[in-house]
Image (cartoon, rainbow, N blue to C red):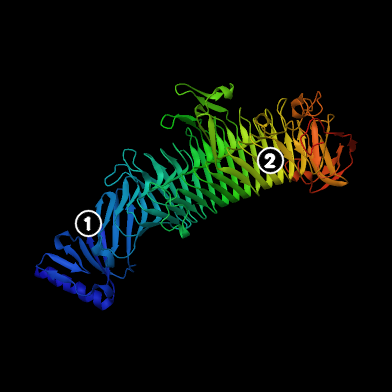
């Protein structure tokens, strides 16, 4: 005992004299006390040594050394070395933490008295280890070149588990590659799990595989700046959180998931909505203002990015591909399908580049239950799956029958873009949400049977933007009124109407090129069966397949021709001014005239009518040469180059039972 006292006294004198660091090793844990902080060290009863209020039992001390190691206050380092791990603890927080090490499985418990943020720096490699920490104060996790697989869970099945409901910064240290894999036999919620809110930052790379549930799971919100996150596989979602998800920069790559790519849910019973600086926000909202996202979902009815609240995209490069078919939801008693972007609230697209592809039956590019607003950015949607049908007991994943005989609860139609909700209550319907396009470029292609291009289950307003739709079913459809007042719109359907409103259809401006299918379908339709009407008061219009019978046309001149050539360039002049150049579809003989040749439909004929409307007397030329004109919708819109040559086409007055103001 006298010898031990002498050794401790000598160490104390050395550390004070040299202003160095005292290292106290207890098993795999080393506590580091800078000389400037040590003060009085209490040696009591020959059994304990107290340094900075950290009490050591002498029998537990493996070694005590002095060196010139620099210690950063508030830090804990964990280095994994195969089947073992070494932990270093800064002396100023030694009294507040209790580390436990079992092989390469590390648990660190924070006491409730800790009053400062602790930073955990994790590095090294192990094929059978984990990191677990608990506490009640915010902390930082630094992933600093960590490769960690949890093969036999001791504290948790996760590779990294933060059982702390406060703010947790997850720093993916710049220049490092980190790989996490969780235990297949655990009950963890994610390979990387944070009970509180996780803020990912720095410019390193994080690879994650979730063998039980999600790849990354946070009990509260998730934010991302700069880091690259690769979810290589997950039984559940790639990334799952509550409250809200916010991405400003960085990269997310997700594949091999058994459910959604990115999912955000409301944590409580009701939404707070968006709050100032997201303080105490619990909205289920998705916010994306920058960065790169690549998601591939193969699961049935999986969503690429899904939110319980609103979705706000103002920047970034987002690519989502879904391949799963639809499914019958026995709880909600309805069919559901895969979708690139989906939210229960409003969807606002004000920037960024979106490429969304869905190949499964019933699949959709993007949908929301509230109001969808597209004001800027580039949106490209391609869907190729057919109708998903289920009668509650049997299913046909590519239904080709008459959907009028199928209850809408039992099927999901493929769509490029869908907004709003139409609900049947008895024999009546209610409508909510809607769709507004005021800017940006929107391109939609739906080739699957019954696939619609752009659909609103309520109103649809187009006030700007460049819109291109090629669809199997209606190109653009609204369950209520549809209004076009500006912008450039190309809508072509191979089996239905180019543009269709179940309410009134108003065209007050803009450039519109609509192509309908065979009779009785038309280029531009309104629900005249329920006394609704097509109103044209302005703009420039090309309609191949005619207009809804009984249309009201004013403010310009409407003419037609039955003689036109398929797959050819035409130039439309508004008086002597070039209005636009356009390319016709391949076939010029599909049967039926304007309005399907029905009453008031204008002159009938053996081929689809080519109808033109402009603010003054229209003139049409065929066989023109277009230079530089492919910039706009592959042949529709303003010509950036020149139009030359061509011969005049004889146009006839478009007549036959129009309403007030008609011709």
Residue plotted at (71% across, 25% down): 520
Q: Quadrant of the C terminus?
A: top right
Q: Measured from the top left, where is residue 626 in percent x and y?
A: 83, 42
Displayed quadrant of residue 603? top right
**Residue tagged 1:** 27
Say which residue appears at 76% left-offset and 35% top-offset: 659
- Mark 2 falls on what kind of element? strand
Whether residue 427 can be seen here:
yes
- Please tell me whether mark 1 sits on a helix, a strand or a loop: loop
Left or right? Give the position of 43 relative to 630: left
Figure quadrant of the N terminus? bottom left
Q: Position of residue 612 (x, y in %)?
A: 80, 37
Indicate whether 317 appears above or below 48: above
Q: From the viewer's perspective, is 640 left or right of 76? A: right
Image x and y of residue 161, in percent? 33, 50
Q: Quadrant of residue 289?
A: bottom right
Q: Nearer the viewer, residue 41 or 257?
A: 257
Q: Please tell me which residue lies in front, 440 or 526.
A: 526
Disc number placed over residue 142 in the picture, else none: none
Tag 2 and tag 1, C-beta contact below 8 Å: no
Q: Name the residue tied to disc 2.
A: 468
Residue 141 at least partly seen: no
């Amino acid at each position: 005992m006298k010898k031990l006292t002498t050794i401790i006294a000598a160490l104390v004198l050395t550390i004070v004299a040299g202003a160095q660091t005292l290292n106290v090793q207890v098993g795999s844990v080393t506590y580091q006390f800078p000389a400037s902080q040590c003060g009085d060290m209490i040696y009591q009863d020959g059994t304990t040594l107290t340094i900075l209020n950290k009490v050591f039992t002498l029998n537990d001390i493996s070694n005590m050394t002095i060196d010139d190691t620099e210690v950063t206050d508030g830090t804990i380092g964990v280095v994994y070395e195969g089947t073992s791990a070494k932990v270093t603890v800064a002396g100023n927080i030694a009294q507040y933490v209790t580390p436990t090490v079992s092989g390469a499985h590390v648990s660190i418990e924070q006491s409730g008295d800790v009053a400062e943020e602790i930073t955990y720096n994790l590095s090294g490699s192990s094929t059978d280890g984990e990191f677990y920490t608990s506490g009640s104060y915010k902390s930082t996790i630094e992933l600093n070149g960590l490769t960690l697989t949890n093969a036999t869970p001791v504290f948790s099945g996760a590779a990294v588990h933060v059982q702390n409901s406060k703010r947790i910064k997850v720093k993916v240290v710049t220049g490092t590659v980190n790989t996490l894999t969780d235990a297949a036999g655990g009950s963890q919620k994610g390979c990387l799990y944070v009970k509180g809110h996780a803020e990912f930052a720095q410019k390193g790379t994080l690879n994650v595989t979730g063998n039980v549930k999600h790849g990354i799971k946070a009990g509260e919100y998730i934010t991302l700046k700069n880091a690259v996150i690769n979810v290589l596989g997950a039984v559940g979602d790639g990334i799952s959180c509550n409250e809200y998800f916010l991405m400003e920069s960085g990269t997310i790559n997700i594949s091999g998931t058994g459910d959604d790519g990115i999912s955000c849910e409301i944590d409580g019973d009701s939404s707070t909505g968006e709050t100032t600086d997201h303080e105490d926000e619990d909205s289920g909202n998705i916010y994306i203002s920058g960065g790169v996202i690549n998601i591939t979902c193969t699961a049935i009815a999986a969503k690429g990015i899904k939110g319980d609240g609103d979705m706000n995209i103002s920047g970034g490069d987002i690519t989502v591909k879904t391949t799963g078919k639809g499914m019958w939801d026995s709880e909600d008693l309805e069919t559901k399908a895969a979708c690139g972007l989906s939210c229960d609230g409003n969807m606002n697209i004000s920037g960024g580049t979106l490429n969304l592809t869905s190949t499964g039956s019933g699949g959709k590019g993007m949908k929301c239950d509230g109001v969808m607003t597209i004001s800027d950015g580039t949106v490209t949607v391609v869907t190729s799956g057919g109708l998903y049908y289920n009668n509650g007991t049997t299913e046909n994943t590519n239904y080709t029958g008459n959907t009028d005989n199928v209850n809408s609860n039992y099927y999901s139609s493929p769509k490029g873009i869908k907004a709003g909700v139409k609900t049947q209550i008895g024999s009546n319907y209610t409508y909510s949400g809607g769709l507004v396009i005021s800017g940006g470029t929107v391109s939609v292609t739906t080739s699957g049977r019954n696939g619609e291009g752009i659909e609103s289950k309520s109103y649809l307003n187009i006030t700007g933007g460049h819109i291109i739709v090629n669809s199997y079913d209606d190109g653009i459809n609204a369950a209520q009124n549809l209004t076009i007042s500006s912008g450039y719109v190309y809508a072509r359907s191979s089996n239905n109407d180019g543009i269709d409103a179940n309410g009134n259809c108003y065209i007050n401006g803009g450039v519109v090129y609509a192509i309908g299918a065979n009779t009785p379908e038309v280029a531009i339709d309104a629900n005249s069966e329920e006394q609704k009407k097509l109103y044209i008061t302005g703009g420039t219009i090309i309609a191949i397949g005619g207009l809804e019978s009984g249309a009201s046309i004013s403010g310009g001149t409407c003419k037609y021709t039955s003689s036109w050539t398929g797959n050819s360039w035409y130039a439309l002049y508004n008086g002597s001014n070039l209005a636009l150049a356009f390319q016709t579809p391949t076939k010029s003989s599909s049967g039926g005239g304007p309005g399907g040749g029905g009453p008031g439909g204008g002159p009938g004929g053996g081929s689809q009518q080519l109808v033109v409307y402009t603010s003054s007397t229209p003139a049409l030329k065929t066989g023109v040469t277009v230079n530089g004109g492919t910039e706009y919708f592959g042949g529709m819109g303003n010509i950036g180059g020149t139009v030359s040559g061509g011969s005049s086409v004889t146009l006839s007055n478009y007549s036959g039972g129009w309403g007030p103001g008609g011709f």
